[in-house]
Image (tube, helix red, strand yellow):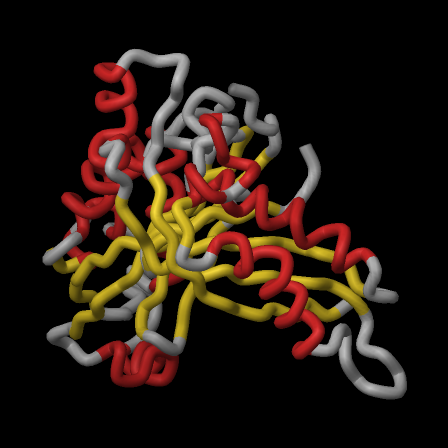
Amino acid sequence: MSGPAAKAYFGRRYMLSASHRLHADALTAEENRAAYGKCNNPHGHGHNYVVEVVVGGPVNSETGMVMNLVDLDLAVQTKVLERFDHTNLNLDSLFEDRVPTTENLCRTVFDLLKETLPADSLEHVRVEETENNFFECYGA
Amino acid sequence: MILLTRRATFSASHYYWNEAWTAEKNEAVFGRCANRNGHGHNYTLEVTVAGEPDPVTGFVVDLKWLKDVMEREVLAAFDHRHLNLEVEEFGKGKLIPTTENIAITAWKRLAPAIKKAAGAQLSKVRVYETPEIFAEYRGGE
């Protein structure tokens, strides 16, 4: 069996539900309110985030795969979903010094997965906060 | 440069099996996808072409033309078929019809036809196996 040794991309969409509050300690109460609007409400609010993870690489000629879905699932499950699903993002140590905007969540997820997935396999991470807004991180 | 994407759906069955491996290894690597009786999906095919809008029509390509190309080159062969048994590229264990290989195969079927459209080129092919799982091919080796 010989498959084309072509580079392809493989992705999966996962869901996680979490709460957050957008509030920067460096800003005054008024400045926070101006910057973040209702996202600054003191008790926080939540989203059903969709986390789309895309890996890229040569298609293995024996399996026909870029990466076994089981391995991708395991990485996302252990590094991302177990950490963030049904939690308050502001209380996670990774957001001690960073506001848990979806931009920062996206980059954080990218960094967590980059550490655990095979070298150079992670193409990008996309986090959809609602159906109408999303953020993408390609590293760098 | 404008990217234009058209979607189409097809339904097909497949299974994953490497003839060079033992049954145990196939089952270990491919799990439930190795069931030799096959299983099926509603696939979504997304074809993206790139080009400049024609100064007269404002089109990168005519969407109806692209629809016909997708229908003729891919859907006519894949829709309501067993990919392992009925699609030439995957026949006799030549190539495992993973989502990655379906995307690459669709690209190879589409590229020559799309090349004929003046000013547009195939940019990427994305195949969703389920709404959550997809593979993408952008050409090249």
- Measured as percent of width and height from the top left, residue A33 is found at 30, 83
- Residue B86 higher or lower than A39, as above or below: above
Task: Report whether B51 appears left or right of B130.
Answer: right
Quarter where residue A129 is shown: bottom left
Foreground residue among A86 and A71:
A71
Residue depicted at 40% across the width and 13% down the height: B20
Is residue A88 in view from this perspective? yes
Foreground residue among B22 and B132:
B22
- Total numbered labels placed on residues in the image: 0
Task: Report whether B28 appears left or right of B1.
Answer: left
Q: Residue furthest bottom?
A: B56
- Residue B100 higher or lower than A96, as above or below: above
Residue depicted at 40% across the width and 73% down the height: A133
- Residue A129 higher or lower than A96, as above or below: below
Quarter where residue A47 is shown: bottom left
Residue depicted at 44% across the width and 38% down the height: B97
Q: Quadrant of the N terminus of chain B?
A: bottom right
Is residue A108 in view from this perspective? no
Q: Residue furthest front?
A: B86
- Measured as percent of width and height from the top left, residue B79 is found at 45, 58
- Residue B130 higher or lower than A139, as above or below: below
- Measured as percent of width and height from the top left, residue A75 is found at 27, 35
Residue depicted at 10% across the width and 57% down the height: A86
Q: Quadrant of the C terminus of chain B?
A: top right
Foreground residue among B141 and A32:
B141
